[in-house]
Image (cartoon, rainbow, N blue to C red):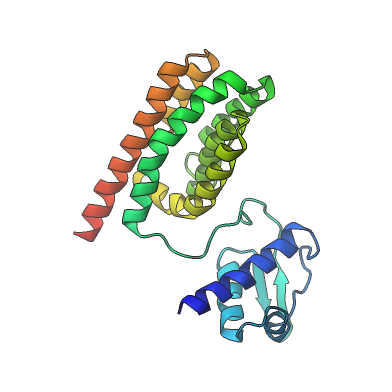
Amino acid sequence: MAYQNNATQMVYDLICDKIKSREWMPNDKIWTEQELSQALNVSRVAVRQAVDRLVEISVLKRVQGSGTYVKHYDPIQLIAIPMCALSSEDLLHIIRFRSSFDSGNVLFFIENATEEDFQALKNSYANMKQYKDNPGRFAFYDFEFHRIIAEGTKNPFIIKINNILRDILLNHQQQLNNAIGSQIGLEYHALILKYICDRDGELASVLMKKHLTVTAAEIERYLKKNID
């Protein structure tokens, strides 16, 4: 089973890479199952699972009797989201870790960010408000907000850790936004943004930590209710 999961991820990554590099454009026919299987030395079952996943999220489309085609190019959909699933406990542990990690990033952001970084943060929050009723888009811009803060620290290690966590969590966060909504995120991000722009690192850091702590508690309540 572990081998099959790894093989499926290999196919998934290859297809995404070819679309992101524009080697395969919208309406282009991709390789056949046999060609993908031979290119990566994996089973056709693994190929089919990866293609099924990309069809589900509207990156690919199957045309009966013809083959599989690129449906359209949307960079939001092609973020490198691992196909492996996180357990509920894993998800909560990561979000709790972020309550300390991201609150520290705020301080480095205020110290090192450029004016362009501050403007990008404002734009990200504006997009969160615009897409508050669209869980997928809201989750993307929510994570963009945190990505901009991480990159504004100018610390390559922080940036790398943030990107790893972002890729792991984004797909799950889209689902969770359906459950807990966008209101908590909007309220806290507005305050965090205000104090960041005021260069008040202490308050911005405290609010970031509180935001993620409250989010984790809401998720825990939701999961407990649905498990019970």
> Is 103 situated above or below 98?
above
What residue is drawn where x is 46% and y is 24%?
192
Q: Is residue 83 left or right of residue 205?
A: right
What residue is drawn where x is 25% and y is 57%?
226
- Give the residue at the far right of this rendering: 23
Q: Is residue 227 left or right of residue 53?
A: left
Res 52 seen here = no
What residue is drawn where x is 44% and y is 35%?
101
**Residue situated in front as seen by the camera: 151 or 88:** 151
**Residue situated in front as seen by the camera: 62 or 150:** 150
Residue 64 percent coordinates (x, y):
67, 83
**Residue situated in front as seen by the camera: 125 or 148:** 148
Residue 30 percent coordinates (x, y):
75, 74
Residue 7 percent coordinates (x, y):
58, 76
- Looking at the rendering, which quadrant does residue 214 occupy? top left
- Looking at the rendering, which quadrant does residue 152 occupy? top right
> Is 177 situated above or below 144?
below
Residue 171 percent coordinates (x, y):
49, 55
- Looking at the rendering, which quadrant does residue 60 occupy? bottom right
Q: Quadrant of the C terminus?
A: bottom left
Q: Quadrant of the N terminus?
A: bottom left
**Residue situated in front as seen by the camera: 169 or 180:** 169
Count of labels in the image: 0
- Give the residue at the far left of this rendering: 228
Res 33 seen here = yes
What residue is drawn where x is 36% and y is 54%?
90
